[in-house]
């Protein structure tokens, strides 16, 4: 292919011959002139094909339809004054086509990619997500997310954080949601689990002396779905050593202000962010993720709120005690002695903090328990026997026996970006999300697997019994 330039660069190539390639966005016939709007990732430009100037090329262009992929060459010319489009970045110029090559043809698309797409069924959009991503709004979202991640990385690296990836194949441990399990061929009847979060690995990095870590971590949780929740998602994951709660809140508030204002150009209602304890928030707002916007209909304003001092434990409907956040959350110093009193455990407060934005939780984190004896007591309160504790968490307790610093962290999923941008669903800010019913629509997964694969894994499909 001849060396092409991005469409946006034509503005710097007036009266120069250029080669462009992309998709036909629209086609307009005007007698002896054909106008094609050519689209690539960077923009749109008007092409002009004249029967008078190039009859053979005009004839070959008669069959071109929307979404065909073509390559063209021609001189960048300024449009006549009455045809200039100042609303378009490239709208002052056009390309009279001198050469044209059809690279591939396209069937009629199942939907238009020239609208915002909100009026199209989400299931249909996700089935043809590779087409849905062609629409300008989705292209812009991909660009925004790329810049968002790059700027977060730059910000944290300047603060001394290292980007470190943690494993996807890990161990099933109770962390609050159901695990996705992966059978092992080499270890029959044994399973890996996909991580609900990198919680234990990032704590082990603190044991290793990394001190400041972050990553954009893939997380997997087999839980009920909502507009702001996915089975597989990505979160900004941050952990640091030798810090207390105030250190974490100060860092994240600085990061959030920078991303909101400088990266996305949004207005923040209150700085510094208001703070409420969990009890205050529930009493005043009836929720632990209050919406403090003066005008809740104004989606362009961001109202951030810190909520702190959450309960450490909660009681489920069946009477069992569960962690309100996760078992590795540190207990407030004044409440540690309550671990020994069964009547007091539900009154224990944790060193946990959430950041709410416009009524949604966008960041969540805590200072971690780094003392093995206290962590062991927490597991016992949660109903684990000593054998279970050793089996499920022995690796972590052993690591803590070799010298572990006080540490804490926080994480934010793509829900933060969704709320900042005022999108209706987290699936809008994810390139290939699962559907609202948990299916990978393009690949039609989950799906059946070959019986030979099951045999190699030592598995057999047993029909689930119906609930009575």
Image: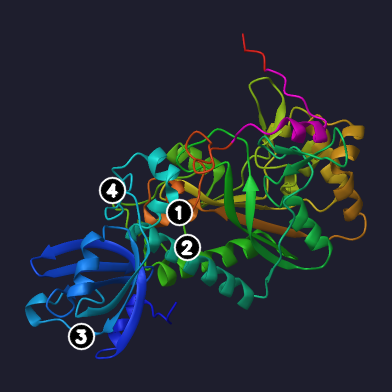
| Lower sequence index among marks 1 and 4 | 4
- Mark 4 highlights which residue? 297
Please say whether residue 227 is one of the residues in the magenta stretch: no
Q: Distance between the residues labelled 1 and 2?
A: 7 Å
Label 4 SS: loop
Depth check, front residue: 122 or 210: 122
Residue 51 visible at all: yes
Q: How far is the residue under mark 1 from the one under mark 4?
A: 21 Å
To which residue does mark 2 refer?
A: 145
Residue 158 image position (x, y, % from top left): 61, 78
Q: Which residue position holds label 1?
A: 429
Proximity of marks 1 and 2: CB atoms separated by less than 8 Å: yes
Nearer to us in this view, 267 or 169? 169
Please provide the residue range marked out in magenta: 446-463
Q: Residue at x 63, y 21 (%)?
A: 317
Q: How far apart are marks 1 and 3 (CA)?
A: 37 Å
- Say few, some or many: other residues with alpha carbon within 10 Å of mark 4 (under 14 / 14 to 19 / 20 or more): few
- Residue 362, horizontal then vertical, whole percent: 51, 51
Q: Where is mark 3, residue-wise?
A: 77
Q: Quadrant of residue 340?
A: top right
């Amino acid at each position: 292919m001849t060396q092409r330039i991005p469409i946006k660069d034509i503005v710097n190539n007036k009266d120069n011959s250029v080669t462009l390639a992309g998709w036909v966005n629209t086609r307009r016939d005007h007698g002896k002139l054909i106008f094609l709007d050519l689209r690539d990732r960077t923009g749109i430009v008007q092409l002009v094909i004249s029967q008078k100037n190039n009859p053979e090329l005009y004839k070959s262009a008669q069959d071109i339809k929307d979404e065909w992929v073509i390559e063209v060459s021609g001189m960048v010319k300024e449009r006549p004054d009455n045809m200039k489009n100042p609303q378009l970045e490239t709208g002052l110029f056009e390309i009279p086509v001198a050469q044209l090559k059809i690279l591939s043809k396209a069937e009629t698309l199942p939907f238009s990619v020239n609208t915002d797409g909100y009026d199209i069924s989400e299931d249909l959009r996700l089935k043809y997500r590779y087409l849905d991503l062609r629409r300008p709004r989705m292209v812009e979202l991909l660009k925004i997310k790329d810049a968002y991640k790059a700027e977060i990385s730059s910000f944290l690296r300047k603060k001394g954080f290292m980007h470190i990836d943690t494993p996807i194949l890990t161990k099933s441990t109770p962390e609050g949601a159901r695990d996705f399990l992966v059978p092992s061929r080499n270890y029959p009847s044994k399973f890996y689990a996909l991580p609900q979060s990198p919680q234990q690995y990032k704590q082990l990095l603190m044991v290793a002396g990394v001190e400041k870590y972050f990553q954009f971590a893939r997380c997997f949780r087999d839980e009920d779905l909502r507009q702001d929740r996915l089975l597989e998602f990505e979160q900004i994951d941050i952990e640091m050593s030798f810090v207390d709660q105030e250190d974490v809140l100060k860092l994240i508030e600085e990061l959030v202000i920078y991303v909101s204002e400088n990266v996305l150009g949004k207005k923040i209602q209150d700085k510094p962010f208001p703070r409420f304890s969990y009890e205050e928030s529930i009493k005043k707002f009836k929720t632990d993720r209050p919406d403090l916007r003066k005008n809740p209909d104004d989606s362009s304003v961001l109202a951030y709120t810190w909520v702190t001092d959450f309960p450490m434990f909660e009681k489920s409907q069946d009477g069992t005690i569960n962690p309100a956040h996760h078992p590795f959350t540190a207990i407030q110093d004044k409440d540690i002695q309550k671990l020994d009193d069964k009547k007091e455990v539900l009154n224990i407060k944790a060193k946990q903090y959430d950041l709410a934005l416009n009524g949604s939780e966008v960041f969540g984190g805590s200072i971690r328990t780094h003392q093995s004896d206290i962590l062991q007591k927490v597991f016992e309160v949660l109903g684990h026997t000593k054998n279970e504790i050793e089996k499920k968490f022995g690796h972590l307790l052993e690591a803590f026996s070799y010298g572990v610093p006080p540490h804490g962290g926080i994480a934010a999923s793509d829900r933060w970006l969704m709320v900042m941008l005022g999108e209706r669903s987290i699936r809008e800010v994810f390139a290939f999300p699962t559907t609202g019913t948990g299916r990978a629509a393009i690949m039609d997964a989950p799906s059946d697997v070959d019986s030979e694969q099951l045999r190699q894994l030592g598995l057999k499909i047993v029909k689930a019994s119906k609930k009575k």
